Amino acid sequence: MYAFRAALLSFADDGTARYEEDGLLVVGPDASGAQVIRAAGAHAALAANYPGVHTTELPGRILAPGFIDLHVHFPQTDVIGSPADGLLPWLENYTFPHESRFADRDHADGMAQVFLDELLRNGVTTALTFCTSHLHSVDALMEASEARGLRMIAGKVLQDRHSPDGVRDETEQSLRDTEELIRRWHGRGRLGYAITPRFAPSCSEAQLRGAGELAARHRDVWIQSHVAENKDEVRWARELFPASRSYLSIYQDFGLMRDRAIYAHCIHFDDEDRALMRDTGAAAAVSPTSNLFLGSGFFDYEGAMRVGFRHGLASDVGGGTSFCPFHTMLAAYFVAREGQTKPGLSLSPQNLWWQHTAGAAEALGLDGVVGNLRPGCEADFVVLDPRATPLLARKTQHARNLDELLFSLIVLGDDRVVQRVYVDGVAV
């Protein structure tokens, strides 16, 4: 075992933050040999229980859970900052051409390393990730993630229609490839598989039906897709699937709504859609920098909280403009202020941070596993420097309470705040 002495940030069951100004975090192996948090709390209360345990002193630093990114595209790392009139032109002009390059395994291997470097540099230790329609894009990301000990959930994109050559797959082969990848990667160490229809308009009924059958056979895998991001996309989906009540209902009609199903965006919803999310246990990956960049709309936080369905934060790189969780949390604050049914909602700094850690873990069905500093949680955490820049140092020095401290980090923070990242107890 070993320990760290620093301020500790963690979260209670109700999502409120717990802050221990002089804390002790003890890390050690569990019965399986995995590195987990053995104890976390006040240094004065815990230190005597761990005599002789080597303790690293980190004065002025904050230990916090590693961030969780609920929706990100590893093949779109180079697409960040590509100008377009909206979602559909952006896909046609930038995204699909970049993703077609992943037919080359060497390119996929190289981009996997760049992608993981960016996640870790920004303190992201768990991600739910889209690969491309190429089977070996999953192999490239999973092999690289396994080598670094990361908890990674990823899947091969399914898109057998309305997609250009180079990224369009073939229906039956795509389903066979998905099953093969589930067998190869799901549950291997810290890796998990996600069945990944790109979005309903890119999939034939046969492909969606096959994806639903795979989801029924493999209940512990994840499902990920996009829904109700853009009004033009919503109209298109309704034209292609006129028998479904709504865009979201398309996924329900094909057996793709359940726990461990994460749908990105979820902007253009009504209360029946929100209730469907709640009743099936599905969760929304809120992607505020992407939605602002592409002009897609604003996630309705008031509606999500009123009806009560799970949600958490996501970068959505490359529609999203940054891997940085601080930028994502700040954008979510702006989005909530705009709102839809009730503009002017002000999300608390504690809630914003919870959405990117313990709340995201809950959305994934991994609460108590990642996203928190509690005994038994995997030892994925970050060392934060609240004085990383001169202006941030001035601001945090005068913080009168936890909300002011966290909000200063959200507004002024970037990757310079992330001083060190621990994955499975190892500094990476």
Image (tube, grey):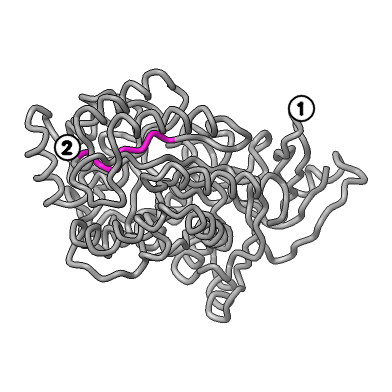
- 118 or 275: which is nearer to us? 118
Residue at 12 percent across and 29 percent down: it is 244
> Residue farthest to the top?
217
- 385 or 172: which is nearer to us? 172
Give the percent coordinates (x, y) of residue 50: 86, 41
Give the percent coordinates (x, y) of residue 328: 40, 59
Is residue 184 on the magenta stretch?
no
CA neighbours of label 2 inside 10 A, class few (<14), some (14 to 19), many (20+) = many
Classify residue 175 by image quadrant: top left
Q: What whole-number distance in Å separates the C-alpha atoms at marks 2 and 1?
A: 45 Å
Instruction: Classify mark 1: helix, strand or loop.
Output: loop
Instruction: Classify mark 2: helix, strand or loop.
Output: helix
CA neighbours of label 1 inside 10 A, class few (<14), some (14 to 19), many (20+) = few
Residue type at mark 2: give it.
Tyr
> In this picture, which residue range is highlighted in magenta?
194-200
- 318 or 15: which is nearer to us? 318
Give the percent coordinates (x, y) of residue 333: 35, 59
Of mark 2 and mark 1, the one earlier in the sequence is 1
The quarter of the rendered structure image containing the N terminus is top right
Residue under pointer 1: 31
Residue at 23 percent across and 54 percent down: it is 298
Residue type at mark 1: give it.
Ala
Say which mark, if any, is on residue 215: none
Say which mark, if any, is on residue 247: 2
User: In this image, 267 relative to 78: left or right?
Assistant: left
Residue at 50 percent across and 69 percent down: it is 413
User: In this image, 313 relative to 231: left or right?
Assistant: right
> Residue farthest to the right?
52
Is residue 197 on the magenta stretch?
yes
Residue at 68 percent across and 36 percent down: it is 375
Cβ atoms under marks 2 and 1 closer than 8 Å: no
Give the percent coordinates (x, y) of residue 332: 35, 57
